[in-house]
Image (cartoon, rainbow, N blue to C red):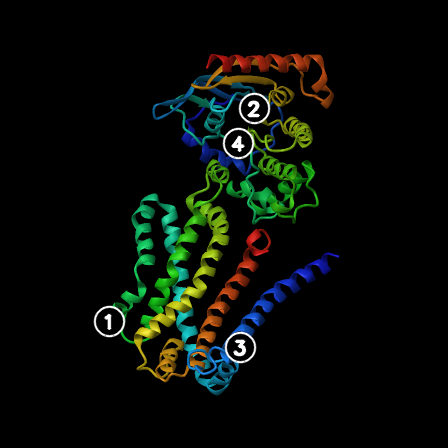
Amino acid sequence: MTDRLAFRRTALNIAAPLFVAVAFVGLWYVLSVTVYADKAFLLPGPVAVIKAMHRDFGTILAATLVTFKEAFSGYAAATLLGISAAALMSQSRLLERSFYPYAVLMQTVPVVAVAPLIVLWFGYGETSVIIVSAIISLFPIINNTLLGLQSASSSLVELFAMHKAGRLTAFRKLRLPGAVPNIIAGLRISAGLSVVGAIVGEFLIGSGNSRGGLGVQIIFAQGRMDTPLLFAEVIFATFLGFGFFIAVSLVGRLLIGHWHESAR
Amino acid sequence: MMPGIPLQERGEKAAAAAASAPRRGRGGAVSIALSGVSKRFDDIVALEPVDLTIKGGSFLAIVGPSGCGKSTLLRIIAGLIAPSSGALTLPGHAVGAFVFQEAALLPWRNVQANAELVMELENIPKAERVKRARHALAQVGLEGFERRYPHQLSGGMKMRLSLARAMALRPDFLLLDEPLAAVDELTRDQLQDELLALCRSSGVTAVLVTHNVYEAVYLADQVVVMSARPGRVIDRFDVPFGDDRAPELRSSPEFVSLAAAVSASLRKGRVDD
C-alpha cells in the first residue's frame, strides 16, 4: 500500500514537470512556425536547434567540458572558502561584525563590472574565469552556513556548556551537523550561479580563444548570427547548472535524508 | 558533607570523577546548599538572596510565576550562571545532569546516540556509554527504539529519551527545568511516576522547577514557593508522603489540602506585586 503510494508520488514528481516541458516545447514550436516563420534568426524552432546540436556536437561538448571545469573549480573554491569563512565568523562576534558587511558587499558589487579588473590582474585565462565564478557563488554559501551555525537551540548550547564541552566539541557535535541543511540550501543556490559566473567570465575573456567554453562559443555563435547554435549552447549551459544542482541535492539527501524534512 | 569548593573548579573535578563515579545509594547521596545566593543582571535584580538546603537523595520542587528567577536559580546550581553573591556548596566530585522543557535532542542522531551524548561530553569510554545508554533506555521504556530518530518519536517518548540521556550519566544531582510542561495531561501523570521511580532507585538529588503545583507536591519532599519582581522565596512546605507514592495519592485529602496551601501561597505572592 505504502509502496504504491510512494510509486504514485514518484510518478507524479516526474510526470508533472515533464508535462510542463512538453507544453513549453509545443508553444515554442508553434511560435517558431507562425509568428517567427520568416524570422528564424530570432527564434529558431526546436528542430533547427536539435539539428545545430547534432551538427556541432563535438564543439559544444568540448566547450561544455571547459565551462564545467571552470564552474566546478569556482564552485569548489567558493564552497571551501564560504564554509571556512562562516565557521570563523560563527566563532567570534567581533569577526562576524568585522567581515560580514564585506561578504555582503562582495555580493552587491557588480561582478560583471569588476571582471575586467580581474582579467587585468589574473590574465586572459581560466584562472580569471574561475575567480569570477567563485565570487558569484560565494555569498549564498557564507550566508546560509553562518545562519545554520548560529541557529543551534539554546537548550543544547546550555547542555554542552554544562558538561564543559569546548568550542571545538560544540562545533563538531552540535553546530556543524545542525548547519548541514542550511549549507546544502546555500550550495543549491550557488550551483546555478557558479555556471553563470563561469559564462560571464568567459564573455569577458573574449572570443580570442577558439577552444573556450560555452560563453566564448555563445559569443561566436552570436557573431555568426547562428541562432540555432546559440540556443543549443544556452541549453547546454542551463543543464550544466541544473546538473550541479541535482548533484548537490543528491549529496544533501545522503547526508541529511534520515533526519531533515527538506531532504525527504 | 564534603567541603564546598568554588564554582569554577567544580567542573573539571566533576569531569575527572565522572568516569569512575560509583553509583551512590541514598546514604551517600550528594547534598546541595545555597547560602545568600543572589543574581542581578545589570540593574535588574533577578534573584534576591536565597538560602536553601537540599538533602542528599531528596527531591526539591520550586514553584513560582514566570520571571520569579526559578530558572536562574536552577542554572546557578548547574554552574551555567555565576551568582552575583553568596555561595553554592556542592561536593567536588558531584556530577550534575540537566533536563530542559524541550527534549533538546540532536535530530541527526538516533535514540541510542542521543542517549550517549552527555556521557560522550564527559569522556566516558564508548563501551561503557553503550551499556549505560541501553540500560537507561530500558528504564524509560524505549527498548527497541534505539535505531529510531527523534522525529519518529512522540512528545512523551522524546522526553523519556531526554530523561534517559540524563540518567545514563548516573548523576549525583538532577536539575529539571519544567520538563513536563509541554506534554499532554495523560503522558504527564505517567512521566511523573516514572520520574519518581527513577529518582528513588538512583538516589539522585533532584531539583525541579515547575508551574504546576500538583506536580510539585506529587514529586517533591520539599516545595519552595517563589514570587516575581524581584524573585524571592516566600514560602516553604515539607511534603510528608514519603518514598512510596502511587497515583491514588493525587486524590487523597492530605494531598489536595497541601496542594491548596501551596496554591494559596502562590496567589499571595501574586497579590503582593
Which circle, 3 or 2, is nearer the viewer?
3
Residue B231, image x and y in percent?
A: 45, 19
> What is the distance, in whole Å, between disc 4 and disc 2 at their CAs?
22 Å
Q: Check if mark 3's residue and mark 2's residue have beta carbons within 8 Å.
A: no
Question: Looking at numbered disc 2 in the image, what kind of residue is underneath it?
Answer: His
How far from the left and from the top, in percent, is residue A53? 49, 83
Density class for disc 1 (Cα within 10 Å; few <14, some 14-19, many ≥20) is: few
- Label 1 element class: helix
* Vertical side of A116 occupied by B230: above or below: above
What amino acid is found at the position of numbered circle 4 in the picture?
A: Gly
**A144 versus A8 height, above or below:** above
Q: Give SS at disc 3.
A: helix
Q: Which residue is mark 2?
A: B211
C-alpha distance separating marks 1 and 2: 68 Å
User: Which disc number belongs to residue B96?
Assistant: 4
Say whether residue A161 is left or right of residue B141. left
Real-space Cα separation, disc 3 to disc 4, in angstroms: 72 Å
Q: Are marks 3 and 1 on the same chain?
A: yes
| Element marked by disc 2 | loop
Q: Residue at x 44, y 65 (%)?
A: A192
The chain letter for the residue carrying disc 2 is: B
Q: Are marks 4 and 2 on the same chain?
A: yes
What amino acid does circle 3 point to? Tyr
The amino acid at mark 1 is Leu
Q: Is residue A108 visible?
A: yes
Separation of marks 3 and 1 at Cα, in angstroms: 44 Å
Tag 4's secondary structure? strand
Task: Using the image, name the chain to which the residue with label 1 belongs.
Answer: A
In front: label 1 or label 4? 1
Quadrant position of residue A254:
bottom right
